[in-house]
Image (cartoon, grey):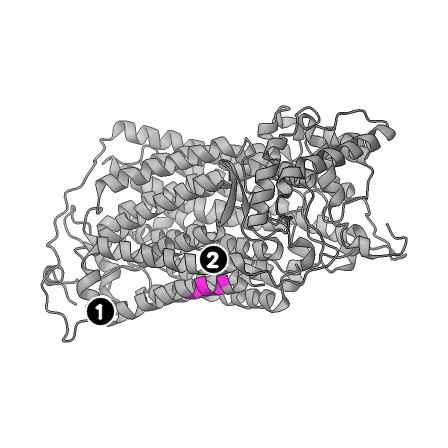
Amino acid sequence: MFAIASVIFGIVGMLVGLLAALQLYMPSLNMGLQYTTFGRIRPLHTNAVIFAFVGNAIFMGIYYSLQRLCKAPMYSKLLSRIHFWGWQLIIVAAAVTLPLGITTSKEYAELEWPIDIAIALVWVVFGINMIGTILKRRERHIYVAIWFYLATLITIAVLHIVNSFEMPVSLFKSYSLYAGVQDALVQWWYGHNAVAFFLTTPYLGMMYYFLPKAAERPVYSYRLSILHFWTLIFIYIWAGPHHLLYSTLPDWAQSLGVVFSIMLIAPSWGGMINGLLTLRGAWDKVREDPILKFMVVAVTCYGMSTFEGPMLSLKNVNAIAHFSDWVVAHVHIGGLGWNGFMTFGILYWLIPKLYATPLFSKKLANLHFWLGTLGIIFYAVPLYFSALVQTLMWKEFNSDGLLAYPNFLETTLQIIPMYVFRSVGGGLYLIGALVMVYNLIKTAAIGKFIPEEAAEAPALTRDYTGHAGEHWHRRIFERRPLQLTIAATVVILIGGAVELIPTFLIESNVPTIASVKPYTPLEVQGRDIYIREGCVGCHSQLIRPFRSETARYGEYSKSGEFVYDHPFLWGSKRTGPDLQRVGKKYPHSWHYHHMFEPSNMAPGSIMPAYAWLHEQVLDTSSTPSKINALRAVGVPYVAGYENTANQDLAKQAGEITDQLKAEGVTTSPDKEIIALIAYLQRLGTDIKMEKTTSSK
Amino acid sequence: MSVMILLIVFSMLTAGVFLLAFFWAAQTGQFEDSITPSLRMLIDDSEPESLPADTSISPLTKTENATGKI
């Protein structure tokens, strides 16, 4: 079931990805609907491919291999079913909420708090099922793949819970407990480790099972697999800050991230070497067998990605690559190559086994392989070009010491051909996947599904005499899986609560800037519109201390400016310009016209139109609960302010509308666009107020 | 940067759990045998037992599973 789900959502996820890619040069492809704009479907694409496609594939791989490695059936069929249906429900919830703009904006953690709770619960069910199976195993040795699965289970639980600490405002909205630079750090501690423990460790575990099985050869060096497992999981956790280089994160934290990211090459390549050398002496098989072709390319892409990643973590490389398409290329080599191809290889091996019949067409599988490989190449290479062209243009100065390309749009127009190529690559990849779907359906049709294989292995002797002085732990916990799991969960929750409450009450010791004040109620509403529309997917809000950035955007960002940003909105990509100091750069009417149809103000712009903001009425009934929630997470609104907040909101909206009137635009103060303008015009202006010179 | 404390504590907690797991594994002999596991996983219970013909390692005996070892 997990296999089928993975395939279905794989196609869905890739389709959404292709739509997003097309929208980057044909922004009107959203068909004028707010639900299908790039900003809203980008997270739909990432969530679909990560949690629906890869997620279901992980469960498929674990449920199949764990039972066989433990020589025992899954601990509980009921839990297996709850796990499956629970997970699919979560995916459906994501598919509904994300296009509606219900999002936290935190990458790979966009799903709002009720779904976060559901994820935690389903994950616990999965954990109980997995640990129960391991404890009831009839093969005493715990194969290395199972260690990878365990690492995944435990670490994802911790990461998800800590990053999801948020204060609900309503059923569909919450504010991150953390703010600004602190939120950034927690987010990327989570984000990078999601890559590590969701996209890497489970797949390494699956590689250690399915690759030897498919090649009919043992792993090259079992010792190496043990060694690289333990080193991998220890080093990976510290690499998170490499997403925040040259930001306002303290230097020592940045350096820590860099060093650990470089060290990570060793254990990662341990995995690659082990995988590839397993095929030594069997390369003739690879030539004939599409399954092995997929797996070899997957492992190779894993190696490439885990070299490129550390290189991107070097500060001097990062200075060029951050916010550019290079990161997108890097992600997709890992995603399309490692995750995608390994999944395809496993599916081509597993489905015939499950249906007791050979694969319907080896030719079609080979066709898929070549389509997919070409797809990866056409995806990544144009984006490398695009990244280099764009960042070098961003950074170029002419001989007068001024920016050579002061208009951001000039850099965008240069790379549009690359975006066209990239979408061709993605399209090829998707076609390959569709070929696979056809092949697998035909295979299932001619085969006969084997729901369960009879497996007999004698039970591990229960009453072995332990060594003298057996630890009390063994007696009470290790032979009682349920108690163990409950105890573990309780311990984790206590630990979490102990950490949460003091953090709650402690004031942040990020250096505060006196002139930085909380957002006004209207600006809060505007910020939430910014989050809803997914603006953070294309626009960053972090000016780095480079002359090319200060010349283009203004004074570089200080950590104190973000203390009230729940959640932070630094962004990861500059498809459009950075907005951290866009406040008061343009008149209100500029923003009004630009949001209505961007190419009116910026001819050739690839930004989609947001005309519904000018029609939709702002829902101000949520203002009091928003103020309360923000106060609860540490923003110093005066007690009782929520009662008068809407009056301030109306007043500020009126001022903006009057100013718009003076600039020739007639609108009414209750429209959403007014709130968004208020927010945009506030950005980055707080520290400008300190300056008494006439700079503007 | 008070959140660093939170993150370091959680990371150390997680690392600690794995460290304990490592000690458990080492003490219960999980690392004693680094040769047969890679071969044993190739054998399916439902298929007639066969090892790949071109491995140069002697086949494991069938009694290994029945008694198990600590």
Query: Which structural element holds mark 2?
Result: helix
Q: Which residues are magenta?
A: B6-12
Q: Position of residue A441 (x, y in %)?
A: 34, 29
Query: Which structural element holds mark 1?
Result: loop
Q: Is residue A279 visible?
A: no
Who's the residue at 27% across and 37% down the image? A81
Who's the residue at 27% across and 36% down the image? A358
**Which is more toward the observer, A427 or A488?**
A488
Amino acid found under the numbered disc labelled 1: Thr
Any mark on residue B28, and which? 1
Q: Position of residue A142 (x, y in %)?
A: 25, 60
**Callout 2: residue from which chain?**
A
**Which is more toward the observer, A237 or A86?**
A86
Q: Main secondary structure of the magenta part?
A: helix
Q: Position of residue A92 (x, y in %)?
A: 43, 32
Q: Is residue A579 visible?
A: yes
Marks 1 and 2, how far apart in space? 38 Å
Amino acid found under the numbered disc labelled 2: Ile
**Which is more toward the observer, A552 or A482?**
A482
Do the residues bearing badges 1 and 2 touch, measured as CB atoms within 8 Å? Answer: no
- Judge left or right: residue A628 versus residue A27: left
Q: Which residue was labeled with disc 2? A: A501
Q: Position of residue A631 (x, y in %)?
A: 59, 48
- Judge left or right: residue A649 versus residue A226: right
